[in-house]
């Protein structure tokens, strides 16, 4: 079968021929891959910034944002049958008995760092024609979400962040006052940093959860991403045109939540400086290694202490985050169907993958379609 692989020793992207996988255990499920999204992580692996092949292999089949169709199931599989659509999870647990997170199927919180991630770390990914994996890593998707289900995995980033937010903010009076006759009252102000796929999906999740939502991104108005933000009832502000002081002042007001989805440390810490009282700042981006940046550490530390602020990082996602992403994606399609569809700006055959990974291709989310 065909696959897209990166050869780290040569820093090369190549179409390879792999042995088609077979069921090995009673709980295995075989998928025919339908679509795989291309994200910044894939591009960074293709640029040899990181990415680790499986032991004994000189290449890594990449891809972790995926949608597959069940073609075969093991004898012990329950609840899945041929023709079902599923989104496979990405991270697999470490082998250590003392890792409570992995032993309770929350490998997204792995304590040891010895987890495996398909398409990223020590396991082949989903950018191939067929995949076999254990049923416990398969999350069913309703057939009516077929056209947008490849967005589930990147949406899980926001879902996990929101679940952490809900737990953390139990520390203080946080519930919105009830206003009669208002279907979706907002009392919390959120700022999303970045208008890439993770940022835009995060903005949808925040709007759906009732936040007054502003996306803060570099590109000046007008632009297509700003149009999408406005279509879901959000606000778009260009960092080229407005300072962070403008953002936290006349444009937004006191910021309750910052959802960082840009991976740029300077802008992140600049916005952290204007986070509101009792606010929470959630980092999800991983910046490339560059030179040092300038921050006012004393000011940040004073604010964090005196304003009861919390800074938290969030990576990967658990099964419940995938399930919440599927539920919310269905709600997004009810509320903003055209906006959701516009997230996927191109579907391409496998032969064009090198240009997608190493070139500059316009669009929000580009996807490999396997037919």
Image: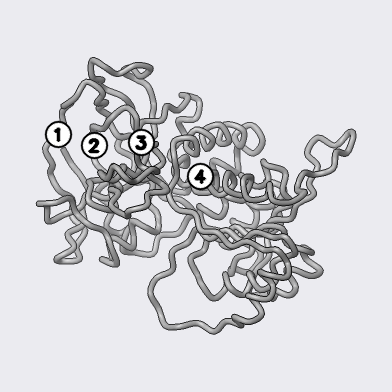
- Left or right, residue 141 beside residue 333: left
N-terminal of the two: label 1 or label 3? 1
- Left or right, residue 176 beside residue 216: right
Pointer 2 and pointer 4: residues touching (CB < 8 Å)?
no
Per the image, label 4 sits on a secondary structure element best described as helix
Q: CA distance from mark 2 to mark 3?
A: 14 Å
* 135 w.r.t. 206: above or below: above
Which callout, 2 or 3, points to the residue nearer the camera? 3
N-terminal of the two: label 3 or label 4? 3
Q: Which residue bears the numbered disc 3? A: 88
Residue 227 in percent (x, y) is at 65, 54
> What colouring method underlies this structural image?
one colour
Per the image, label 3 sits on a secondary structure element best described as strand
Q: Which residue bears the numbered disc 4? A: 155
- Left or right, residue 199 beside residue 212: left
Q: Which residue bears the numbered disc 1? A: 20
């Amino acid at each position: 079968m065909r696959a897209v692989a990166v050869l780290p020793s040569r820093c090369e992207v190549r179409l390879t021929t792999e042995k088609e996988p077979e069921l090995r255990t009673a709980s295995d499920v075989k998928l025919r891959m339908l679509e795989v999204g291309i994200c910044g992580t894939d591009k960074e692996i293709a640029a040899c910034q990181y990415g680790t092949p499986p032991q004994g292999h000189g290449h890594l089949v990449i891809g972790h944002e995926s949608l597959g169709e069940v073609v075969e199931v093991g004898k012990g599989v329950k609840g899945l049958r041929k023709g079902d659509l599923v989104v496979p999870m990405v991270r697999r647990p470490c082998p250590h008995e003392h890792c409570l997170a992995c032993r309770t199927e929350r490998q997204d919180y792995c304590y040891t760092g010895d987890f495996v991630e398909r398409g990223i770390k020590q396991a082949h990914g989903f950018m191939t024609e067929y995949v076999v994996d254990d049923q416990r890593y398969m999350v069913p998707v309703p057939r009516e979400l077929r056209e947008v289900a490849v967005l589930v995995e990147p949406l899980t980033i926001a879902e996990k962040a929101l679940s952490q937010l809900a737990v953390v903010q139990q520390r203080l009076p946080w519930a919105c006052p009830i206003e009669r006759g208002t279907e979706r009252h907002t009392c919390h102000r959120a700022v999303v940093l970045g208008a890439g796929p993770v940022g835009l999906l995060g903005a949808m999740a925040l709007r759906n959860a009732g936040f007054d939502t502003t996306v803060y991104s570099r590109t000046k108005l007008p632009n297509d991403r700003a149009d999408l933000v406005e279509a879901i009832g959000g606000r778009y502000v260009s960092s080229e045109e407005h300072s962070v002081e403008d953002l936290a002042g006349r444009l937004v007001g006191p910021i309750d939540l910052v959802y960082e989805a840009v991976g740029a440390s300077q802008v992140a810490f600049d916005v952290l400086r204007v986070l509101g009282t009792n606010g929470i700042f959630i980092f999800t981006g991983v910046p490339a290694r560059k030179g040092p940046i300038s921050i006012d550490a004393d000011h940040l530390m004073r604010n964090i202490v005196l304003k009861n602020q919390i800074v938290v990082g969030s990576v990967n996602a658990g099964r419940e985050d995938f399930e919440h992403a599927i539920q919310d994606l269905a709600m997004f399609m009810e509320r903003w169907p055209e906006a959701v569809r516009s997230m996927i700006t191109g579907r391409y055959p496998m032969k064009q993958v090198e240009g997608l990974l190493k070139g500059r291709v316009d669009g929000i989310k580009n996807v490999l379609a396997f037919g």
